[in-house]
Image: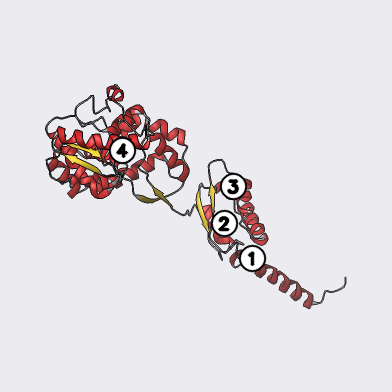
Amino acid sequence: MKKVNPKYYLVAAALCLLCFLVGIYCIKMADFSKSEDTQYVYIDDDDTVDSVKVKLEPIATNTGMMVFSTLASTMDYAGHLKTGKYAIPASTNTFTVFRNLKNGHQEPVRLTIPESRTMDRLAGALSRKLMLDSTVVAILLSDQDFCAKQGYDTATIACLFVPNTYEVYWNTSLENLMARMKKEHDRFWEGERTIKAEALGLTPNEVCTVASIIDEETANNPEKPMIAGMYLNRLKINMPLQADPTIKFAMKNFALKRIYHDMLFYDSPYNTYKYVGLPPGPIKIASVAGIDAVLNRAEHNYLYMCAKEDFSGTHNFASTYQEHLRNAAKYTKALNERGIK
């Protein structure tokens, strides 16, 4: 048998070492993404290793995809596939991308709670930002037992939500989201706001209910304390609130531009023309500005208000019904002149 020259062993070893180093370079050093911007991939409950690869292919370089596939098959990615939103920044190596996906190192989502008029609209907004099914969310938010677990009922559950922006994970469950919203709600009401509500003789839920009506009356935040003062004056003397937005909510017709006399008799506990006191709950998720307007209401003697005839979005206030009728006549005239029905 011919003896092999030892230098061939050295060459073979060097080549193996070179291949090993190239492999390490591909895994540790080579960029995974071909984009110069951060890209995101969303992995949900229905995904498999193959479907994850399909989602990654538009982002990845050829080398990055090849290395990812090798890592996925040799390091049991199938057994560690985790849902979530994952960021893939530019100049991130493939091993880091793989490790983040395998270990569930997600990128938080900035979730803004909107001032939704109904819970089904909120459900839709949540499903567009999170891995939640809007139908399931809407059903649960209209379920008395589910709402009772949060400390509310179906009429007051909107009070739980404070419309701010929060960082949450895309795959958070509805139960975890509700727990987070409860924590944020309690933090929002802790201290001064609760003290001010108690001084008014109102609970936080009642403050939110008044605030929701004010929010629907005007988008003009500086005027909201004036409107709050008027509604609280009415509550104090047991006078019906007679708030037009509650008619729209009761009839579930938010496109109404005018409230006609026959609508005032629509039978609903939300009809504040027909029933004295506050409706069962908010007619929308109240804004922070609306809530603070109630807690810091303007003190005055006004009992009436009517939209200004200049359509500025502000109101004329009155202490007497006769004065209010004059303001209402001016506004009705302006509506008719513009052909608004």
Q: Mark 3 sits on what residue?
A: 78
Residue type (three-letter) at the residue carrying disc 4: Ala
Q: Residue 245: image x %, image y %?
A: 30, 34
**First in residue order: circle 2 vs circle 3:** 3
Q: How many marks?
A: 4
Residue marked by disc 1: 26
* Quadrant, the N terminus: bottom right
Badge 2: residue crowd in 10 Å (few <14, some 14–19, many ≥20): many
Secondary element under disc 4, as helix, strand or loop, is helix
Q: Nearer the viewer, residue 29 or 340?
A: 340
Q: Amino acid at mark 3?
A: Ala
Decide if residue 61 is on the left or right side of residue 288: right
Which of discs 4 and 1 lies nearer the camera? The answer is: 4
Mark 2: which secondary structure? helix
Instruction: From the image, state whether disc 3 or disc 4 is nearer to you.
Output: 4
Q: CA distance from mark 4 to mark 2?
A: 65 Å
Q: CA distance from mark 1 to mark 2?
A: 13 Å
